[in-house]
Amino acid sequence: MRVADRSGSRARRLAPVALAAVPAAFIGVFFLYPLAGVLTRSFDAGTLLETWRNPVTTDVLWFTTWQALASTALCLTVALPTAAVLARLRFRGRRFVHALLVVPFVLPTVVVAAAFLSLMDRFGATDRFHHTVWAILAAHVFFNYAVIARSVAAYWSQLDPAPEQAAAVLGASPLRVFGAVTLPRLAPAIGAVSAIVFLFNFTSFGVILILGGPRRATLDTEIWRFAVQRLEFDTAAALALLQLLCVLILVVGATLWQRRRHVAERLRTDTARRVRGHADRALLAGTLGVAAVVVGLPLAMLVERSLRSGGDYTLENYRRLGQGGERLQALFVSPLAAIRHSLEFAATATGIATIGGLLVALAVSGRRRRGVAALEGAFLMPLGTSAVILGFGMLLVLDRPPLDLRLSWWLVPIAHALIGMPFVIRSVTPALAAVSPRLREAAATLGARPARVRREVDLPLALRGLAVGAGFAFAVSLGEFGATAFVVRPERPTVPIAIFRLLGRPGETAFGQAMAMSVILLVMTAAAVLLIDRLRPAGAPDF
Amino acid sequence: MTIRGLEVSLEGHEILCDLELSVRRGEILALLGPSGCGKTTLLRTIAGLQAPDGGSVSWAGEDQRSVPAHRRRFGMVFQDHALLPHRNVGANVAFGLRMQKVPAAERRRHVAEMLDMVGLDGYERRGVATLSGGEAQRVALARALVTEPKLLLADEPFAALDRPLHDRLLADVRHILTELRQTAIHVTHDHAEAFAIADRVALMRDGRIHRTATPQQLRDDPQDAWTATFLGLGTIWQPAGGVPRTGGQDVSTPWGTVTLTASVPTEPPPRGEFCILIRPEAVRPGGSSGVRAHLSDVRVVGDRTVATFHIPGAPPLEAYVPTDVTPGRHYRITLDPKGVTLLSPEP
């Protein structure tokens, strides 16, 4: 909005900068400074090249890469048929299936790992599969199946079917049409999501730590082992730099590829058709069956295992959570205390992320200029950086004055807020962009000052978006493991940390308790996500 | 309100140039012009939503340049009504009063009165989304009027409404504005709407005010070919070299010689090249004298029958005719001098 007042418009141009100053300082101190700390540490140590040349490092890098590639390929194979059905068929409960498919993506990694442990336990396959790459691949498919199916289906359902119909009229068989027309048109969507899924798999941490065991190490798990268990910060920093370089190359490469492949497709609203006939019904049943096995089975086994103790179905595992005592020495505290910590951390992190994200969104809204886009990009960076690097960086630099937060309660919620803020920004920005400038002008002509316009017009209209972002930030904080594993205090574990510690303990009791806690975390996260989906306005972006 | 030498450019394009306009207290001024002539930009500049590159907007002698939109106390009604979707009708109307810190009880009374005035008595608790287009526009009008603005700016408020609703609302709004003695600028591209609502009409063309006059003056004496064409007043005959004038008030046309009775422009155009406007009511078909013309087409416009007559070497002539004419036949036509006006040509 431009206003006739010259000096006023100057102040108004500067206002967004002022708005973003607080979150910018937050990102600077708690994200960029730790990241810089990792870089300088890796250069200063003098052992950088030595670490990189070490054959163990080469092995770790190789394993990290090929497991990520194999996971991505496997995910695509399983998920693309589902995407096809979700894109092309309209059926009752389609929206619900879509919503349900978000759940795996935001599930805490430790819960997924616990689910696969119980799955292997149920079928007596623990000895054969635990600590193998197969367990890792399966867990990665669980995580990313829905990401691929949802994003490809969303793009696919908006494609104009006219080219396919034209090809069919020209005599191409259905298979030929798919290969020659549909698949190339889908390539941008498939390419983009493959790059993201590869990135997730490449930087996967919790799943590999728990399911892979000591012999199946990736860069992220090695960084953790060197930094937290062996306290060899120099080696950890060298590995972190290697990880950052790999991710950077991947992101730049994917961006360049996407730019080259970019085709302006005229997108339509939704081109799915109703389910008709037996073939459609069989296809739909098959797809829902696959989804049920891939997503539902591990979770079902997790719930089942949590209810089993000594061969009987009982609530014993849950009852034991309430008791502290010597059985839970590994935790230092009772599991219920861990739940309390998690909720307190999550509430605080959500508060910080919501306020910070809202300020950033207000600052960038309505100003689609270059500098502003870069500003928004800077705030989204924590989303592209692995939580392990973030946690490691905070561990490295926030231990000396003036920022000696080593023992501070705030370190965990701050780390979670950094990871949650991009979700808030990405759900509030489109909501603000959708507010018609006419409404702001109408309010101005009725006597509302610019600040009042923000409060009376923008804020209420962006509230749903804000609630969605806050919900994601809350869910992410509840399940966060990678960064927490670095910065958590032993006497204040979160639920994921408590589960991880219990899984590391021998014996049936600890395992049962880990399963019970995982179910509790599962329920809390799933509730948050399903609530978000109810609030989400139609057409809002996915993450 | 007085506007002097106003200049506005948007993205490098000059939208308004050297624009002059004044509005008298208590009058309704229609700002009439074709799409893209800068009407909306002018209105937004007056409201303070658009910064001018030059010139001044002043109210009662006070320059408004340094007054931001929210302190000008100019009410605005938008074409898409711009009602706040998260507030009900009552809260939308009360918005401006809240900004002025009017106490709640007083606010409620004013809102009820104003809703009553626009014909939406008791609508306070209705959701904005449940309103029809006409109702929404009435709410938008009430919202702007309840703050007793110094000047009401309406930007094509009826453009999206169907004809009967449009006409009813137009009459209501004129009535309300007159009753309140509200100074108002009403933007429209529809000359019938402008004539129906306004005390004076400012014709706008390519970023300037072309002419300001009462609806009567504009209709009776359009003065130039552009105005007559835009207002759709009739057929323009503009022969190369100007209308041949045989002396005095006589002009000879392909449809016969006419002795002008209507006013002649006070300032003759350069080289004396006039053209003439023949209004449809001036054409008298069916007599025994006059020029033979071919009747090509008959159509019904409003409650009139309009026919098109052709004669070789002249433009098609639009005329009001009785209902019993037959397309394809030839008729003798004569021109009634009262319906023929001399114009300066299109520049």
Image (spheres, coloured by chain):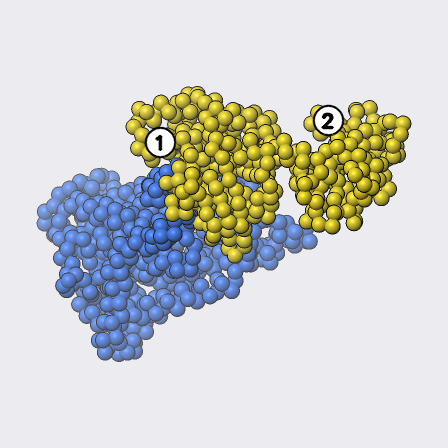
Foreground pick, A362 / B276: B276
From what the image shows, is residue B220 above or below residue B116? below
Element type where label 1 sits in the image: helix
Where does residue A535 sit, x and y in percent of width and height? Answer: 37, 39
Question: Residue at 26% across / 78% down in the picture?
Answer: A50
Foreground pick, B239 / B62: B62
At label 1, the amino acid type is Leu
Task: Pinpoint the chain carrying mark 1.
Answer: B
Which mark is first along the chain, 2 or 1? 1
Task: Pinpoint the chain carrying mark 2.
Answer: B
- Label placed on residue B304: 2
Graded by Cα atoms within 10 Å as few (under 14), some (14 to 19) or many (20 or more), the crowding at tag 1 reads many
Residue situated furthest right in the rendering: B288
Where does residue B173 sit, x and y in percent of width and height? Answer: 51, 27
Whether residue A414 appears in this view of the structure is: yes
Residue that carries the numbered disc 1 in the rendered image: B97
> Tell me, what hue is chain A?
blue
Whether residue A426 appears in this view of the structure is: no
At label 2, the amino acid type is Arg
Graded by Cα atoms within 10 Å as few (under 14), some (14 to 19) or many (20 or more), the crowding at tag 2 reads few
Where does residue A144 sit, x and y in percent of width and height? Answer: 39, 54
Q: Please indicate whether residue B304 sits to the left or right of residue A188 in the image.
A: right
Q: Please indicate whether residue B273 sits to the left or right of residue A201 in the image.
A: right
Same-subunit check for callouts 1 and 2: yes
Question: Residue at 49% across / 44% down in the picture?
Answer: B3
